[in-house]
Image: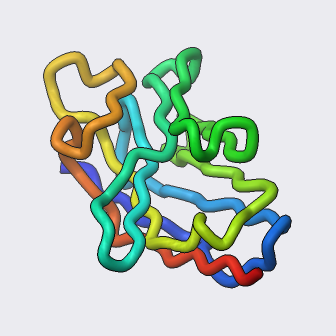
Amino acid sequence: QVQLVESGGGLAQAGGSLRLSCAASGRTYAMGWFRQAPGKEREFVAGMSSSGVTTHYADSVKGRFTISRDNPKNTVYLHMDSLKPEDTANYYCATVRPPAMWIVRTRPEDYETWGQGTRVTVSS
């Protein structure tokens, strides 16, 4: 089973930017980024198909966040611009569960393998 390691989290000011990385130990198919703030449920942020052609974003981040992937490096990125305090959360990357592993999914239960998360804190 592939292993995922997120990095790139940290402290940013409102309006600033961060780039998260998700390094996989092997080939991955469709990937997603989720986040979970204290006391809240894990929520979908962005997803990308295995080919990289199809992307999907939560309305709350659309136009501010960009998901991308480098398949030869088995790495997925989440570039976050115009950060807001409400973006503060632990961010997780995950791989889509079979079958149809190449299609973007938005529900946490459709994902099979998760990283340990990286913390993002946005100050006002």
* Picture residue at 42% right of the left edge, 42% below the top: 32
* Picture residue at 36% right of the left edge, 79% below the top: 38
Q: Is residue 77 above or below residue 102?
A: below
Left or right: 76 in relation to 64 = left
Depth order, front residue of 45/114: 45
Q: Is residue 56 above or below residue 80?
A: above
Q: How is the image coloured?
A: rainbow
Q: Is residue 84 above or below residue 50?
A: below
Depth order, front residue of 24/103: 103
* Picture residue at 61% right of the left edge, 61% below the top: 20
Q: How many marks?
A: 0
Q: Quadrant of residue 83?
A: bottom right
Quarter holding the C terminus is bottom right
Left or right: 3 in relation to 79 = left
Rendered location of residue 102, percent (x, y): 34, 20
Q: Quadrant of residue 73?
A: top right
Q: Quadrant of residue 8?
A: bottom right
Rendered location of residue 52, percent (x, y): 56, 23
Depth order, front residue of 48/37: 37
Left or right: 28 in relation to 11 = left
Q: Is residue 43 above or below residue 119?
A: above
